[in-house]
Image (tube, helix red, strand yellow):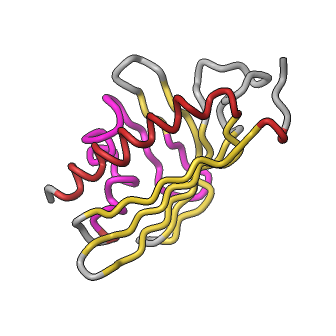
Amino acid sequence: MTETAADTLTIEHTIRIAASPETVWTFWTEPERLAEWWGTDVEVEAEPGGLFRVVMDNGSVMRGAFTELDPPHRLAFTFGWEHNAADEPLAPGTTRVEITMTLDDDETVLVLRHFDMPATHAPDHEKGWSYFVGERLVAAASAT
């Protein structure tokens, strides 16, 4: 069964990180920094249309492309799972993630929005973003 736009939603997380937006930016755009908190192997070409590929600990591969970069305040990329066929939910390029980073005192307020998430997959991705961004990214970026 193919999900329709009516069957999708937006996941949103807002977190605070004890680091500047410039520092947090590097954790999204530099492969070695991205690998500190998200995956075991990372390929990143931080330019519009550039590859954004993350191999997870369990072997799953997130594949997308950057659609927008406004350092160090905003970036967006497409998101999907490399093993999913083009007609399956969460195939590469079928959803979009937008990250905004705003300085507040000496911390960064990061807002992550994951658009067009198939409703049936939302609970797993909600947990995933909470763990990876809400825990691992916060810990890695705050330690710099």
Give the quadrant of residue 57: top left
Give the quadrant of residue 107: bottom left
Report x, y in % for residue 6.
84, 40
Residue beneath the point at 39% across and 54% down: 29
Position of 37 with respect to 65 (left or right) is: left
From the viewer's side, name the closer residue of 99 and 125: 125
- Residue extending farthest to the left is 143
Position of 129 with respect to 39 (left or right) is: right
Position of 89 with respect to 65 (left or right) is: right
Report x, y in % for residue 59.
41, 17
* Residue 105 drawn above or below residue 85: below
- Residue extending farthest to the front is 123
Query: In what quadrant of the picture does the C terminus appear?
Result: bottom left
Number of numbered discs present?
A: 0
Q: Is 25 a magenta residue?
A: yes
Position of 19 with respect to 65 (left or right) is: left
Residue 110: tell me if it is visible: yes
Q: Is 125 a magenta residue?
A: no
* Residue 21 drawn above or below residue 126: below
* Residue 133 drawn above or below residue 84: below
Query: In what quadrant of the picture does the N terminus appear?
Result: top right
Residue 77: tell me if it is visible: no
From the viewer's side, name the closer residue of 30 and 13: 13
Bounds of the magenta segment: 23-52
From the viewer's side, name the closer residue of 5 and 68: 5
Residue beneath the point at 72% across and 26% down: 89
* Residue 115 drawn above or below residue 142: above
Residue beneath the point at 59% across and 62% down: 68
Report x, y in % for residue 84.
65, 20
Report x, y in % for residue 9.
70, 44
